[in-house]
Image: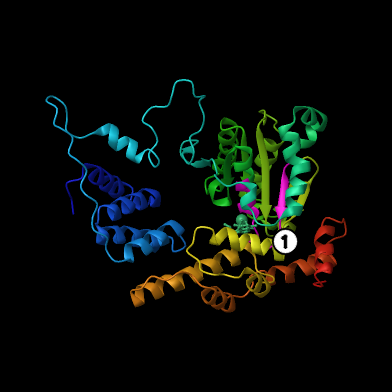
């Protein structure tokens, strides 16, 4: 397939070297389409869609690739050969790929920092710099307000920080049914702050060898401190921190003890490290972790209301080729859907339109009918969670930990 275009050839090799990089592949596909290499372009787009059917850029390129072939652009004028110089124009090639490939050398005056999307901490913990903003999070206004008061304002303002002093040290625990945006929100918060983001799950720290799990937990904090300002996010805290009584073997106990020591900053300063956690089952989180100064403040993240569903649908359809979509009936049809359910709905509708386009050979956009059909096939996934939550609100809320949950369920007539 190798053609005369050196830029295409070098991008082809780059794709062969990193076949899982969708950005690179789609960039190549775009250039191939420009060059009239439709078939090869479509094969790259198909590879991306195979891994990520919801990829909107890929869907758009696929639509381009499936339209009747345009006459190829006239070839680039050959640069006049210069004696003693290689004929390949590196500068032009670098300029061409500058939006997908980082420059080879950073400018001298740039402060040293963790590069975006690059693993640090020996490659075991991935520190990223999310592009998301709080504005990308649909709804969740109450959560945003709570965070503004408890977190963002003191972060932005030195005086407030001094005033709050130690109280900022504790972490905040987001809880609620699955798929309602806890993880999404945490990443958006890091993006909003321009901070690094380090997400940790149980598999990142647990190790069968005695002592290794504690060291892993210690390394997590080392990585976060090295990347400060950094949001250190313990996802699914109930997994990391099951009630210790329920655990045989004691590995989890050691991990929790280490986590507590690191949180308390016994041996090191956690300046610039902001700890957030999330859990679908906060009632399974070790009580030691819920004490003051730890994950004592909780924020309930509930399924999106009507306005929020509209915002989430808009967000997930923002780059997709839609036609004449009326959101109001969709919003009405999706009561109880989580953010993840809505994202899934948009993907299912896209897939339907795409498969239809491939089958008929005529490209068409995503219609209201695709979306309504998808909504009809999906059921809200939050039901079982509320069944458990009901028991908790009724029988395990002696200390008022779940007052917010109980009030919400009463309002929704779930209690
Ligand atoms: N408020 C929201 N706005 C936009 N997208 C959302 C929202 N909530 C959830 N989503 C979508 O659902 C996906 C799953 O949400 P996630 O944050 O992983 O849920 P949780 O961590 O609460 O289980 C997200 O990646 C996002 O695509
Ligand atoms: Mg999550």
Q: How is the image coloured?
A: rainbow
Q: Is residue 172 magenta?
A: yes
Horizontally, is 87 left or right of 65 in the view?
Answer: left
* Residue shown at the point (76%, 53%) measured from the top left: 142
**Circle 1 sits in a helix, a strand or a loop, which is it?**
loop
Q: Provide the residue span drawn in magenta.
A: 171-188
Residue drawn at point x = 20 percent, y = 45 percent: 5
Q: Residue furthest top?
A: 108
Task: Inspect the magenta stretch and tell me whether residue 133 lies in it.
Answer: no
Relative to 252, residue 351 above or below: below
| Residue 405 placement (x, y as % from top left) | 80, 61
Please tell me how crowded label 1 is: few (under 14), some (14-19), or many (20+) other residues with Cα within 10 Å: many
Q: 83 or 215, which is in the foreground?
A: 83
Query: Does the rendering let one see residue 295?
Result: no
* Residue 343 position (above or below residue 241): below
Which residue position is annotated with label 1? 302
Picture quarter with ligand 1: bottom right
Residue at the image position 62 percent from the left and 60 percent from the top: 312
- Visible residue check, residue 347: yes
């Amino acid at each position: 397939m190798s053609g005369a275009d050196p830029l295409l050839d070098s991008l082809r090799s780059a794709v062969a070297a990193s076949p899982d990089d969708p950005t690179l592949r789609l960039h190549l596909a775009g250039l191939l389409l420009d060059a009239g290499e439709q078939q090869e372009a479509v094969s790259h787009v198909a590879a991306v869609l195979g891994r990520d059917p919801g990829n909107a850029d890929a869907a758009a390129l696929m639509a381009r690739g499936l339209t009747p072939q345009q006459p190829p652009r006239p070839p680039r004028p050959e640069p006049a050969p210069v004696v003693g110089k290689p004929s390949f124009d590196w500068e032009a090639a670098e300029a061409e790929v500058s939006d997908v490939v980082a420059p080879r050398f950073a400018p001298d005056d740039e402060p040293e920092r963790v590069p975006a999307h690059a693993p640090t901490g020996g490659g075991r913990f991935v520190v990223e710099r999310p592009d998301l903003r709080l504005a990308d999070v649909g709804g969740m206004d109450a959560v945003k307000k709570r965070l503004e008061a408890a977190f963002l304002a003191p972060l932005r303002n030195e005086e407030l920080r001094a005033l709050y002093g130690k109280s900022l040290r504790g972490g905040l625990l987001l809880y609620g049914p699955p798929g309602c945006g806890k993880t999404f929100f945490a990443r958006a918060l890091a993006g909003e702050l321009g901070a690094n983001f380090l997400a940790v799950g149980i598999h990142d720290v647990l190790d069968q060898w005695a002592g290794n799990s504690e060291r892993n937990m210690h390394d997590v904090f080392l990585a976060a401190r090295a990347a400060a300002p950094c949001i250190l996010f313990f996802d699914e805290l109930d997994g990391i921190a099951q009630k210790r009584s329920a655990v045989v073997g004691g590995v989890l106990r050691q991990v929790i003890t280490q986590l507590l020591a690191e949180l308390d900053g016994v041996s090191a300063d956690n300046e610039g490290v902001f700890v957030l956690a999330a859990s679908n089952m906060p009632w399974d989180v070790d009580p030691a972790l819920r004490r003051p100064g730890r994950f004592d403040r909780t924020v309930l993240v509930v399924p999106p209301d009507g306005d929020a569903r509209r915002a989430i649908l808009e967000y997930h359809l923002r780059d997709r080729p839609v036609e004449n979509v009326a959101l109001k009936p969709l919003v009405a049809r999706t009561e109880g859907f989580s953010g993840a359910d809505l994202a899934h709905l948009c993907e299912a509708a896209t897939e339907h339109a795409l498969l239809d386009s491939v089958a008929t050979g005529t490209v068409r956009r995503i219609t209201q009918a695709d979306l309504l059909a998808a909504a009809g096939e999906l059921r809200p996934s939050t039901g079982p969670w509320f069944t458990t939550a009901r028991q908790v609100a009724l029988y395990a809320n002696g200390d008022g930990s779940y007052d917010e949950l109980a009030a919400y369920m009463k309002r929704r007539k779930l209690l």
